[in-house]
Amino acid sequence: MKFGRFEQQGRVFFGAVEGDQVVELEGSVFESHKATSKKHALSALKTLVPCMPYNFYCAGLNYAAHIEWANRRTGSNLKVPEKADVGYRSPNALIGTGETIVIPADSPGPVQYEGELVAVIGKKARGLSEKDALSCVLGYTLGNDVSERGWQKSDRTLWRAKSSDTFKPMGPFIVTGLDPMNLTITVRINGKIVSEYGTDKMLFSAQRYISEITKYMTLWPGDVLWLGTDNATLPDLQNGDLCEIQQKDIGVLSNPVKRASA
């Protein structure tokens, strides 16, 4: 199934996406819901962020090639983590497909994309083994972990480097039944492929992250776990760019880029 969250004339609802049509649902995909008789053209609706999470988790360094590139870029000596390292982001930074990534006027740069697979939690979970970890997942969507590298160096908590308003595009849809360890993520800037990688290269699987989180914390329906990026994240994002993250089943997360005026 492919689910989305939509707006029509100020009214917000979940829907099941069937080709270029959306079947309106009664209720939330995270609770009891059923299909209605209402159908809409997808093009006639505004596609929103597919969920607004209570908790927004993210993987630390989770791909070897990205670590190697970061070391070359910064002259640092980052090591492959010994265990799944969990971080947090602000839901306030979330925007949907089609919305604009706004680079703050005082950003020293560079600002870069990070195309990621995102696990969307579908039911309450605590103390899951790796074997059972995916039982709490509703499905998967895409994320763009926009990162201000200058601030990333200076801000110990990464608060504005990673969570400035508009820095977390997510979407377009939540797709069920996917294997999170066997997908291809493609990133395009202005129509040109700049990165493509397989999720089978994760250092720590989605199952490992979920198991690790639920040792200590409860996952709730609608929570999200962003699973990291591979490769370099070049070229830097510039005013006027169009950044697209794609996976063939989930679709295209597309966002223009604008630099705010001083």
Image (cartoon, rainbow, N blue to C red):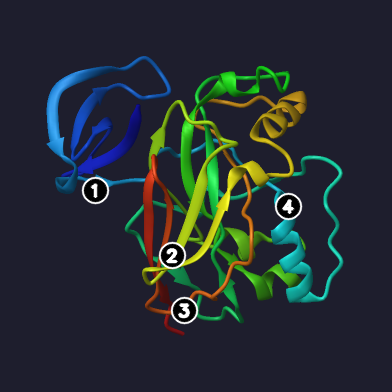
Q: Position of residue 28 (x, y in %)?
A: 35, 24
Q: Nearer the viewer, residue 181 or 168?
A: 181
Which residue was labeled with disc 3? 238
Q: Do the numbered discs 1 and 2 sit on residues whose CB atoms are within 8 Å?
A: no
Q: Under tag 2, what secondary structure?
A: strand
Q: Which tag is nearer the camera, tag 1 or tag 2?
A: 2
Specify few, some or many for label 3: CA neighbours under 10 Å numbering under 14, 14-19, or 20 or more: some
Q: Considering only order in the chain, which callout, 2 or 3, is on the residue closer to the N terminus?
A: 2
Which residue was labeled with disc 2? 188
Circle on res. 61? 4
Instruction: Tell whether 24 sits left or right of 79.
Output: left
Which residue was labeled with disc 1? 46
As measured in the structure, the alpha-carbon distance from the residue carrying label 3 to the one carrying label 1 is 25 Å
Q: Position of residue 17 (x, y in %)?
A: 26, 33
Q: Which residue is painted at 64% across and 34% down in the image?
A: 206
Q: Which tag is nearer the camera, tag 2 or tag 4?
A: 2
Q: Which tag is nearer the camera, tag 3 or tag 1?
A: 3
Q: Which residue is painted at 71% across and 49% down in the image?
A: 62
Q: Is residue 155 visible?
A: no
Q: Considering only order in the chain, which callout, 2 or 1, is on the residue closer to the N terminus?
A: 1
Look at label 1 and name its amino acid: Lys
Q: Under tag 4, what secondary structure?
A: loop
As measured in the structure, the alpha-carbon distance from the residue carrying label 3 to the one carrying label 2 is 13 Å
Look at label 3 and name its amino acid: Gln
Q: Considering only order in the chain, which callout, 1 or 3, is on the residue closer to the N terminus?
A: 1
Look at label 2 and name its amino acid: Arg
Location of residue 244 (image quadrant): bottom left
As measured in the structure, the alpha-carbon distance from the residue carrying label 1 to the one carrying label 2 is 22 Å
Q: Nearer the viewer, residue 14 or 118?
A: 118
As measured in the structure, the alpha-carbon distance from the residue carrying label 1 to the one carrying label 4 is 33 Å
Specify few, some or many for label 1: CA neighbours under 10 Å numbering under 14, 14-19, or 20 or more: some
